[in-house]
């Protein structure tokens, strides 16, 4: 899959390209704000309380850029 196409936007057999706003969002979520390197993203599952823990870290700057807990429905 092309990185600039929506994974679930297939209608009539045609993949719709991402908008500029969507591309910017993907870049900010996957690149370090300080150096621009690709972030390493780790996800852990906690089935006992139905949460996913997402951690994003920059391998170059050695900082955590994001830690989020997501409730599973």
Image: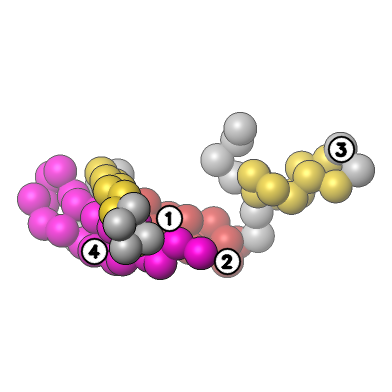
Q: Which comes sooner in the sequence, label 4 or label 2?
A: 2
Picture residue at 65% right of the left edge, 60% below the top: 19
Q: Nearer the viewer, mark 1 or mark 4?
A: 4
Are the residues tagged 1 and 2 within 8 Å (C-beta)?
Answer: no
Q: Which comes sooner in the sequence, label 3 or label 4?
A: 3
Residue position for label 4: 67
* Place of residue 48 in the rendered image (x, y in percent of width and height, measured from the top left): 30, 57
Seen from this angle, which residue lies furthest top?
A: 1
Q: CA distance from mark 3 to mark 1?
A: 26 Å
Residue position for label 3: 13
Q: Which residues are magenta?
A: 52-73
Q: Nearer the viewer, mark 3 or mark 1?
A: 3
Q: Which comes sooner in the sequence, label 1 or label 4?
A: 1
Are the residues tagged 3 and 4 within 8 Å (C-beta)?
Answer: no
Q: CA distance from mark 1 to mark 4?
A: 17 Å
Residue position for label 2: 21
Predominant secondary structure, magenta span: strand
Are the residues tagged 4 and 2 within 8 Å (C-beta)?
Answer: no
């Amino acid at each position: 899959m092309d990185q600039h196409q929506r994974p679930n936007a297939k209608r009539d057999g045609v993949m719709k390209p991402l908008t500029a706003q969507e591309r910017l969002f993907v870049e900010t979520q996957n690149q370090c704000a300080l150096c621009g390197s690709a972030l390493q993203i780790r996800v852990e599952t906690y089935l006992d309380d139905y949460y996913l823990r997402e951690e994003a870290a920059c391998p170059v700057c050695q900082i955590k850029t994001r830690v989020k807990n997501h409730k599973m429905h």
